[in-house]
Image: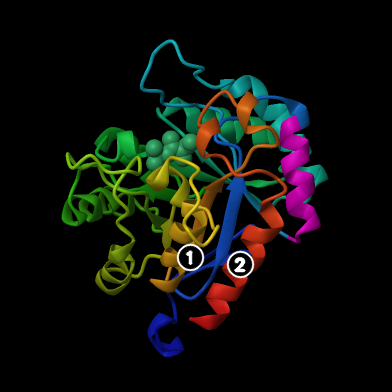
Amino acid sequence: GRHQEELEGFGFDYNGLHFDQDSFHIFAGLCAVDTRENVARIFAALKEMGISTSRMGAYKPRTNPYSFQGHGKKCLPWLFELAGKYNIRCIAMEVTKESHIEEIRQALEEAGRPTGIMLQIGTRNAQNFELLKAVGQQDEFPVLYKRGMGITIEEALNACEYIASEGNRNIIFCLRGVKTNLGDPHRNLIDFGHVPVIKRLTRLPVCVDPTHSVGIKEWAPDGILDIFHAAAQGIIAGANMILVEFHPRPEEALCDGPQALTLEELPHFVADMALVREAY
Ligand code: PEP
Ligand code: MN
């Protein structure tokens, strides 16, 4: 990482967690909140590993209008209650329109603030400037900005500027792969080579999302999943955060099941990433 003096004054604290270009967090969880039991199982597994950060989608931006769209605000009261029960301090949660921010704020308030939320801007809204301004105009929640799947780094940095210029500088920049027309074996082409580029052009912590880049569960010849490899590559490149999807029963998931890691794979994932981080 950078020299400590260089980083002084940058980065941010949120709900007892620190984020900067040297910090490291794994945000593991469901693509989409489905049942109370599945959420509880994920949170319990994370607690067991000493992890207090997660991801949970309530508002899902789906390609197909007939696909499950997420439980929306209905699930927030019990989701937040469970988060408190399992000591989850921060959940990355996508918002697809401005009113979702207020729904989350209100549900958190009513639940007695048992956890924290990081507002996720998904790849499909990476240039939704009104939404970017809306998350920028509040400073209660940090923002996880995902690079658009088909936009340049310059355009993505301008999108972050939309958030920051409204007042909220607590932003994490997430790489999640880009689309190409080359018939890639993975859902998106991995853009983790850009981790150091973002780190030198900005002071933002950088997240990598191996799940949505790879988009499939395939094993490399060494017996390791492509998703593990992508996460490890992100860490080697200097990532400060890994956003990754798990499901207790991927075959029953209502969204992104084929790419979900299982709870049996969680301890291996965490241990492998710790080893990679130690080595680099
Ligand atoms: C997600 O994180 O569940 C998601 C929809 O990601 P992306 O916006 O990167 O496709
Ligand atoms: Mn997903």
Q: Residues within 10 Å of mark 2 (few under 14, many from 20)?
A: some
Q: In 3D space, how far apart are the residues under numbered discs 1 and 2 (Cα atoms)?
A: 8 Å
Most common secondary structure along the magenta stretch: helix
Label 2 residue SS: helix
Q: Amino acid at mark 1?
A: Ala
Going 24% across and 39% down the picture, which residue do you hit?
127
Which amino acid lies under the numbered mark 2 shown in the image of this protein? Answer: Asp
**Residue 48 belongs to magenta span:** yes
- Displayed quadrant of residue 234: bottom left
Residue at screen point 80% across, 56% down: 48
If you read the primary sequence from the N terminus, does the residue marked by circle 1 or circle 2 appear first?
1
Which residue: 41% across, 80% down?
Answer: 7
Q: Which residue does the numbered mark 2 point to in the structure image?
A: 272
Magenta part of the protein: which range?
38-50
Residue 170 in sight here: no
Residue carrying label 1: 232
239 magenta-colored: no
Q: Are marks 1 and 2 in contact (CB under 8 Å)?
A: yes
| Secondary structure found at label 1 | helix
One can see residue 241 in this view: yes
Above or below: residue 57 compared with residue 214: above
Name the image quarter holding residue 24.
Answer: bottom right
